[in-house]
């Protein structure tokens, strides 16, 4: 009888250990999806989940599953929505003091990789803006016109070395433009030079939500594909095989140069750090009007009161090509692989008090 009781005791102890270990493993799996969990605390991305003290003292960026936990914990109480979400919007970043506007002189850097007709419309509007305000002596320098990154950077250096009174220069950085993984020093030197002259650098970067960006890129790729049939293009894109798909995160960090083989959380950390350190305005297409921001900063008049017209990228048909459910599935795979999903998630946390975005994940 005593022997049986001892056996039962051992079994119960082992069962308790097994249940406890399973619970801890389950919690870890739920808290760290694919090992890609990270928290951004005072500008430093950590591989560790914030501990309880950090959650109350520091403003973390929570990954999707942790936000769901916050929602499940209710509107109030520890780790609940009202307790966690407000701190997501307290991360420090560069801002523009509206009481100092408009600036009297300076450089506006406009960086974007919005594909196709809408990206071209942005560039055309900027040129029209310069033409409409020719009395203030503004100059427009486009990386696409420069033809190479080296030529574009050389033109920026000419602005830094320019002697005499400075007025306004607008820099359009897209194709052949800056790669912020290595070109942060260009912006630092440009900002220092402008401040020494009593002028300002306004660095602006524009992004799109991932699905919107992917649809625009599909439209552009199809338009540029020579001798492509609709069937061939569709099958190749839907399969994802042998498709070169560079996302916004890679364009921002590396432009059209070689992409470093880094973990996505490292790339997101680098991009967010660069944006917070060097950029005054970070805008999401569809949520902000970049033209109004430029007019607000400079005090210029809009070209004939014109507004930028969206290029209708959400049309389901592109010529004979149709967006499909399988394309959207492939977009999601692209975004997970190249880091755009995590990057745009971080942008929405830091730059937009968008509770609907958080709840809908």
Image (cartoon, grey):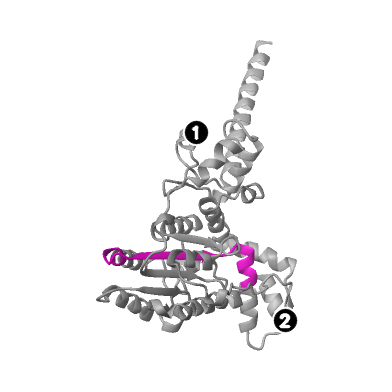
Total labels: the figure holds: 2
Query: Can you tell which of label 2 and label 1 is closer to the viewer?
Result: 2
Out of 44 and 185, give the one closest to the viewer: 185
Does residue 245 sit above or below 100 in this rendering? below
**Quadrant in which residue 246 is drawn:** bottom right
Residue 52, labelled with which disc? 1
What residue lies at 54% left-to-right and 51% top-to-bottom? 349
Percent across and percent down for residue 336 are: 59, 60
Determine which quarter of the picture holds residue 332: bottom right
Magenta residues span 193-216
Q: Does residue 271 appear in the picture of this structure?
A: yes
Residue 250 in the magenta stretch? The answer is no
The image quadrant where one finds the N terminus is top right
128, above or below 247, in the image: below
User: Does the magenta portion include 205?
Assistant: yes
State whether residue 149 appears in this view.
Answer: no
Could you say where residue 245 lies in the image, as x and y percent from the top left? 57, 71
Please report the residue visible at 65 percent of the width from the left and 80 percent of the height from the top.
222
Q: Is mark 1 on a helix, strand or loop?
A: helix
Q: Residue 324 carries which label?
A: none
Q: Nearer the viewer, residue 52 or 294?
A: 294
Q: For the view shown, which residue lies furthest in the bottom direction? A: 227
The residue singled out by tag 2 in the image is: 319
Spot occupied by residue 179 in the image (x, y as percentages of width and height): 42, 69
**Of pointers 2 and 1, the one earlier in the residue sequence:** 1
């Amino acid at each position: 009888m005593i022997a049986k009781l001892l056996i039962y005791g051992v079994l119960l102890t082992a069962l308790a250990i097994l249940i406890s270990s399973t619970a801890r493993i389950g919690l870890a799996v739920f808290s760290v999806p694919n090992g890609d969990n990270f928290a951004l605390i005072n500008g430093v991305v950590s591989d560790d989940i914030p501990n309880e003290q950090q959650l109350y003292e520091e403003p973390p960026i929570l990954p999707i599953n942790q936000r769901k936990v916050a929602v499940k914990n209710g509107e109030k109480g520890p780790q609940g929505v009202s307790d966690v979400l407000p701190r997501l919007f307290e991360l420090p970043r560069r801002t523009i003091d509206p009481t100092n506007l408009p600036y009297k002189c300076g450089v506006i850097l406009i960086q974007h990789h919005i594909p196709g007709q809408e990206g071209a419309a942005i560039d055309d509007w900027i040129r029209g803006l310069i033409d409409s305000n020719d009395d203030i002596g503004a100059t427009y320098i486009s990386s696409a016109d420069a033809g190479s990154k080296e030529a574009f950077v050389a033109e920026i250096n000419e602005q830094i070395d320019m002697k005499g009174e400075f007025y306004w220069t607008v820099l359009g950085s897209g194709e052949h433009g800056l790669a912020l993984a290595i070109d942060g020093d260009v912006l630092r030197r440009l900002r220092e030079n402008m401040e020494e002259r009593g002028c300002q650098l306004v660095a602006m970067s524009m992004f799109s939500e991932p699905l919107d960006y992917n649809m625009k890129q599909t439209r552009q790729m199809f338009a540029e594909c020579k001798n492509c049939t609709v069937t061939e293009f569709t099958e190749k894109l839907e399969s994802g095989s042998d498709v070169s798909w560079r996302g916004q995160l890679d364009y921002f960090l590396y432009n059209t140069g070689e992409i470093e083989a880094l973990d996505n959380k490292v790339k997101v950390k680098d991009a967010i750090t660069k944006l917070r350190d060097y950029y005054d305005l970070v805008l999401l297409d569809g949520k902000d009007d970049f033209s109004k921001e430029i007019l607000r900063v400079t005090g210029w008049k809009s070209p004939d009161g014109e507004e930028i017209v969206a290029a209708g990228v959400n049309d389901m048909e592109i010529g004979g090509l149709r967006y499909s459910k399988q394309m959207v599935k492939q977009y999601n795979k692209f975004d997970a692989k190249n880091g755009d999903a995590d990057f745009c998630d971080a942008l929405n946390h830091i730059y937009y008090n968008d509770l609907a975005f958080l709840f809908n994940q």
